[in-house]
Image: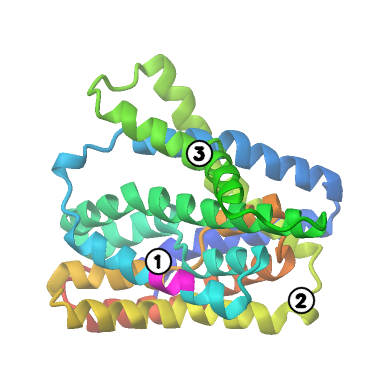
Amino acid sequence: MTLDHPVLSSLAPVALLIFIGLVAGKAQLLSGDSVRDLSKLVFMVLTQAMLFRTMSQVHIEQLDFAPVAQYLGVTVALFFALVWAYGRQARATVLAFAGVFSNTLMIGVPLVGLAYGQAGQVLLLTLVSVHALVLLTLATLVLELQVAREHNLALGQAPQLWRTVGQALLSALLHPVPLPIMLGLLYAQTGWGLHPVVDKPLQLLGNAFAPMALLLVGITLSQTSWGTHLGKALRLSLVKTVLHPLLMLGVAWALGLRGLSLSVMVVVAALPMGANGFLFSQRYRQEEDAVTAAVAMSTLMATVGISLALLYLPGASA
């Protein structure tokens, strides 16, 4: 496999950014408090810009949602299965979200473009347009429900279902992830477009999201004890890079998905974890070390599954 192979040319920059962050962390260029503050900046500013700008360009009537619906159906089912398996607490949701959220932008877009050409990218961008909307909003709602319930139990109060649901829905709606997604999607339907004075800063901020988030993964990784989290990170990486694509392949095939659509959906499922899983663990302070290690580990492990998908599934142009 040469360096210009679609898999390596897409995954290598991600691995390199994590490695640079690891070196910066080992060199102690940032203190622990600074890392957390920088994580908040990425989550509260860069993520907002990226999500709003992405969704503001989505025209729902032009998208083919059939393969995307199958992808999301499998992914959401796996998400809830993982939440159940991990114990149905806030930590379980963070782990489950990390285990199903693919790195569709930084790795998926260039990889699918190189391997499947323009037709493949149209399919991927259709998925990208709703990937964050569905999975981030769902994970936020479930997490806020769990956090509200755990808070009530910690205070010795019996959780009141409707009040807990109401608090969780309000928190989810005002959350810094679903809010820009919904606002961007609503704005897109006006057809006005973004003026360059607004669009350019949003583009610059959005472009900074992926490298900054991956540098933070590396920096946090430098402060992580691998020994105590290696097993959990390995299991989570296997879920993301092996179980997720195998489920996608089996269900999609059974439901009649074939050709390019099948190939793209399986490749996307085989992608490593996205940085949003890491940022969620940081924001909610749940399973931070395990998710950080799993982001790096899944990036390395994904080379196998993606290569097999490109080799054996139809439609590749390279």
* Magenta region, residue range: 76-80
Q: Horizontal placement of 281 versus 134: left or right?
A: right
Q: Point out which mark residue 76 bears.
A: 1
Image position of 271 with respect to 166: above or below: below
Q: Amino acid at mark 2?
A: Trp
Q: Which numbered disc covers residue 173?
A: 3
Q: Position of residue 262 (x, y in %)?
A: 21, 72
Q: Mark 1 falls on what kind of element? A: helix
Count neighbours of disc 2 (C-alpha within 10 A) and say few if under 14, some if 14 to 19, many if 20 or more: some
Q: Nearer the viewer, mark 1 or mark 2?
A: 1
Question: CA gap, disc 2 to disc 3?
Answer: 36 Å
Position of 231 relative to 167 (above/below): below
Q: Nearer the viewer, mark 2 or mark 3?
A: 3
* Residue 226: image tag: 2
Q: Quadrant of residue 74?
A: bottom left
The Cα–Cα distance between marks 3 and 1, rounded to whole angstroms, is 19 Å
Q: Residues within 10 Å of mark 1 (few under 14, many from 20)?
A: some
**Nearest to the observer: residue 254 or residue 215:** 254
Confirm whether residue 214 shows in the render. Answer: no
Q: Mark 1 or mark 2: name the one nearer the start of the chain.
A: 1
Quadrant in the picture for residue 316: bottom left
200 in the magenta segment: no
- Residue nearest the viewer, comparing 169 with 209: 169
Q: Name the residue located 76 percent from the left edge and 40 percent from the top edge.
A: 37
Q: Position of residue 102 (x, y in %)?
A: 44, 63
- Label 1 amino acid? Val
Q: How many residues crowd mark 3 within 10 Å: few (<14), some (14–19), many (20+)?
A: some
| Residue 201 in the image, given as x and y percentages of width and height | 48, 24
Specify whether 75 is left or right of 261.
right
Is residue 152 visible in this depiction of the protein?
Answer: yes
Secondary structure of the residue carrying tag 3 is helix
